Image: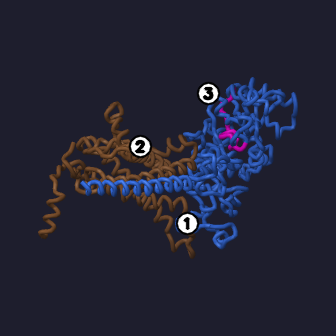
Chain colours: A brown, B blue
């Protein structure tokens, strides 16, 4: 129950709220499954490259490296399946579902909005614009740092996985057989896969910061949109 | 007529029993069914020996050293005889014009029917003057001799990938032979040196079946380079258990734990060391306590230290690995995020103030 004082306060800040349904359930589910998978992949992957301190006792008593690698491979499979499902949803979902895969590169207005967003982040614009989907700068960075990086990580990751799964396995046939020769040798693929992980880490840092900041500073909802799917606008100005 | 392999063996004093043993061992080492033993025996009894020309470019002769130590039962006398190794300037008695005449003779007599084995590679800078063979640049001799060969074997990392002489900055522009020879099947047998039994195994396969072994995309015989050292390493259980050597003189090193943290390249190296081993199956680097350096992989000299797990990225101009680069970038972005958030907060505070004053 709202008290009389609460009602008064609410009336003082009161405004009508417009809302648009942006992110459909599969997109939101993918986002959060991905978030978990990427977290598991980054942590387990780091420990594959730089393992924990050596275990004492007999080898038969432990399987720590085995479990870490299992977590990495399992999360990798989930990431792959999720990504394939997400591509499918880009075809059948609403037009926001296609933003990650298609950049309107020939659209002049879109480019001017990219510049506008850059100016907004450089504190050169006093007032943010409203966007229903991603703002153009966000879309641009997501395309490069999520879509392309994920494709790269899936290709190199399953190429490395296929080396262990051996010739004849699906991952060896589909990935190892061309990715390893393309890079020259397996060690290079490891190094690049490692760098890809850091690109993801950078993205997550910027992504979380930008989402929280926009939630506070912009004229629309951000964080809750990825939970409920609804984009709420805080004012009626265009 | 040229002698058959069998005749050579008998002449060398090998009994028929030993000969059949050799055929069985060869079949086993090539991963063939027992039914292939009589086929190998028949081929060796009836086929004339295929002549082999063995050229040396920029190299250290470690491939030859490895090859002549093949611990295969009959290596010393037979494998060399079996090859009908008609030209090998390191091993042959002839020298000078006499030796060079043999190349010309084989080229003419066995046109399109001899095997060219190349140890080392040609340097291309200064018109190939960094490696002279019989008074001419090696690259010319190589191209000429390859032109009439049936197939070319690239011995070792030098001929296959370039090896140390092609490591950055590669002053002589040493170039792997597949970049120089075209239109001939090239079998790469990388390693620095390759394992003796792998070398004799490849030759035996080619002579016995009259065809080259099945190769992978990088031109290596699948039967010996289809798996990584790591896949068959006897220390693998320690890897899965997370038991690692952390320093060369620690307890884990004495107990024979996994050398992964010491930069062992077993997980990224395709070779048969962990199964075939060296010196007649006595040992291999990991077994003697040192990590694999990945000597059969392309450009293994330029992948940072042999003792690093996460290898250096020298392209950045500083000694750094992927983690250092990534952590530095994460630090910069993190600092930027904090600074940006601070400025945003101040800006918002000011806006609230002005709005409040209105």
Chain of residue at mark 3: B
Q: Residues within 10 Å of mark 1 (few under 14, many from 20)?
A: some
Residue B32 shows in the view: no
SS at circle 3: loop
Q: Residue at x 54, y 64 (%)?
A: A51
Where is mark 2, residue-wise? A144
Residue furthest to the front: B357
Q: Residues within 10 Å of mark 2 (few under 14, many from 20)?
A: some
Where is mark 1, residue-wise? B237
Q: Residue A223 placed where, x, y %?
A: 29, 56
Q: Earlier in the sequence, mark 1 or mark 3?
A: 3
Q: Residue B205 placed where, x, y %?
A: 64, 42
Q: Is residue A41 magenta?
A: no
Where is mark 3, residue-wise? B183
Q: Residue at x 14, y 64 (%)?
A: A8
The vertical placement of A156 against B123, above or below, is below
The magenta span reads B148-164
Q: Residue at x 45, y 52 (%)?
A: A202
Q: Residue at x 46, y 65 (%)?
A: A67
Chain of residue at mark 2: A
Q: Is residue B152 magenta?
A: yes
The vertical placement of B133 against A153, above or below, is above
């Amino acid at each position: 129950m709202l008290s009389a004082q609460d009602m008064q306060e609410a009336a003082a800040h009161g405004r009508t709220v417009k809302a648009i349904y942006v992110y459909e359930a599969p997109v939101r589910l993918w986002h959060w499954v991905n978030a978990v998978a990427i977290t598991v992949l980054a942590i387990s992957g780091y420990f594959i490259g730089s393992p924990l301190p050596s275990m004492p006792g007999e080898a038969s008593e432990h399987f720590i490296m085995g479990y870490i690698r299992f977590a990495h491979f399992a999360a990798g499979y989930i990431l792959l399946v999720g990504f394939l499902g997400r591509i499918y949803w880009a075809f059948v979902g609403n037009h926001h579902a296609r933003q990650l895969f298609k950049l309107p590169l020939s659209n002049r207005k879109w480019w001017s909005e990219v510049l506008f967003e850059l100016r907004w982040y450089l504190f050169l614009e006093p007032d943010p614009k409203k966007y229903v989907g991603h703002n153009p700068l966000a879309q641009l960075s997501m395309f490069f740092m999520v879509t392309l990086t994920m494709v790269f990580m899936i290709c190199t990751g399953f190429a490395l996985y296929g080396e262990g799964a051996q010739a004849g396995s699906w991952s060896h046939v589909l990935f190892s057989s061309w990715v390893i020769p393309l890079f020259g040798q397996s060690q290079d693929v490891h190094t690049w896969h490692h760098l890809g992980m850091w690109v993801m880490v950078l993205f997550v840092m910027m992504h979380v910061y930008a989402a929280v900041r926009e939630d506070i500073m912009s004229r629309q909802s951000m964080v809750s949109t990825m939970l409920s799917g609804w984009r709420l606008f805080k004012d009626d100005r265009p | 007529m040229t002698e058959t392999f069998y005749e050579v063996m008998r002449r060398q004093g090998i009994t028929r029993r030993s000969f059949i043993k050799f055929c069985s061992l060869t079949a086993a080492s090539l991963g063939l069914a027992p039914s292939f033993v009589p086929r190998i025996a028949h081929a060796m009894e009836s086929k004339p020996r295929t002549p082999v020309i063995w050229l040396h470019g920029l190299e250290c002769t470690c491939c030859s050293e490895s090859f002549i130590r093949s611990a295969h039962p009959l290596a010393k006398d037979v494998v060399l005889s079996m090859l009908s190794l008609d030209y090998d300037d390191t091993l042959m008695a002839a020298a000078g014009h006499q030796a060079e005449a043999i190349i010309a003779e084989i080229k003419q007599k066995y046109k399109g029917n001899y095997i060219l084995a190349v140890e080392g590679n040609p340097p291309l800078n200064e018109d190939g003057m960094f490696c002279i063979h019989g008074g001419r640049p090696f690259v010319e001799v190589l191209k000429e001799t390859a032109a009439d060969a049936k197939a070319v074997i690239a011995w070792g990392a030098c001929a296959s990938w370039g090896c140390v002489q092609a490591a950055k900055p590669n002053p002589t522009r040493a170039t792997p032979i597949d970049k120089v020879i075209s239109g001939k099947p090239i079998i790469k047998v990388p390693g620095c040196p390759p394992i003796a039994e792998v070398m004799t195994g490849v030759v035996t396969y080619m002579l016995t079946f009259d065809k080259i072994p099945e190769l992978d995309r990088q031109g290596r015989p699948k039967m010996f380079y289809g798996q990584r050292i790591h896949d068959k390493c006897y220390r693998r259980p320690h890897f899965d258990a997370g038991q690692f050597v952390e320093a060369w003189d620690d307890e884990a090193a004495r107990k024979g734990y996994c050398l992964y943290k010491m930069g062992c390249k077993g997980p990224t190296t395709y070779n048969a060391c962990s199964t075939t081993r060296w010196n007649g199956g006595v040992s291999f680097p990991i077994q003697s306590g040192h990590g694999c350096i990945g000597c059969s992989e392309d450009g293994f000299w330029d992948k940072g230290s042999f003792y690093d797990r996460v290898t250096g990225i020298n392209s950045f101009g500083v000694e750094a690995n992927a983690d250092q680069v990534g952590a530095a970038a994460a630090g910069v972005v993190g600092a930027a995020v904090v600074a940006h958030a601070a400025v945003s907060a101040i800006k918002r505070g000011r806006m609230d103030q002005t709005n409040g004053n209105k």
